Amino acid sequence: MFNRTRRRQAAEHSDMHRQQVELLARLESQMSPEVERMQAEAHGPAEPDALVDDFLPPELRVMSHDQLDGRMMPWPQPLVLNGEMATCTECGAYRDWLILSTRDQIWLRCRAGHQQHETRLDTAWYNRHAGPADATHATFEDCLRHLGH
């Protein structure tokens, strides 16, 4: 029963496809010479495109992730990992983190300046949650100032 249904559907599909091809051929043959002339004029003679340097000038290029020493992003809300809230081991802060990604490691930095390695996070997690970079900085301190820490 299913084979008959499949054969019928295949036959209907091939009939529809054949009808579409025939209709398209009829429409193309009905095109007036005036339309063909206008299309030829619109496209004009085939001239080679001018070579254009499609790269940004060096001052506008953004460094790739492998050219950076690290990246960081603010995380103002509490950070919950595996059902428990991350807290600073020195001062007990649980929100307003800076999350640093460097050398395939993730570090948390609290507002007081304490840093701790976070083994429950990885670079893939960072990449999923980080937005696009809005600036690059020459030093770690410049980046901290930029992010308000």
Image: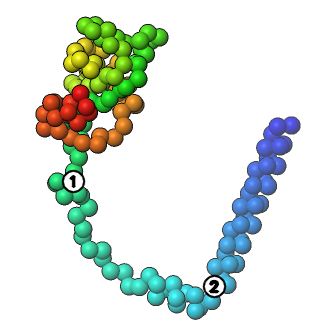
In the rendered image, the quadrant that contains the N terminus is top right
Q: Residue furthest bottom?
A: 34
Q: Quadrant of the C terminus?
A: top left
In the image, what residue occupies the spot 16% across and 54% down? 58
Q: Write down the quadrant of residue 47 in the picture.
A: bottom left
Please provide percent x and percent y for residue 52.
24, 68
Which picture quadrant has residue 18? bottom right
Left/right of residue 63 with respect to residue 30 in the rendered view: left
Instruction: Please state which amino acid type lies under the numbered disc 2.
Output: Met
Report the residue at 47% width, 11% height from top.
83
Per the image, the residue denoted by label 2 is 31
Which secondary structure lies at badge 1? helix
Q: Nearer the viewer, residue 64 or 131?
A: 131
Residue 124, disc: none
Q: Quadrant of residue 148?
A: top left
Specify how the rendered protein is coloured: rainbow
The span from disc 1 to disc 2 (Cα, nearest Å) is: 49 Å
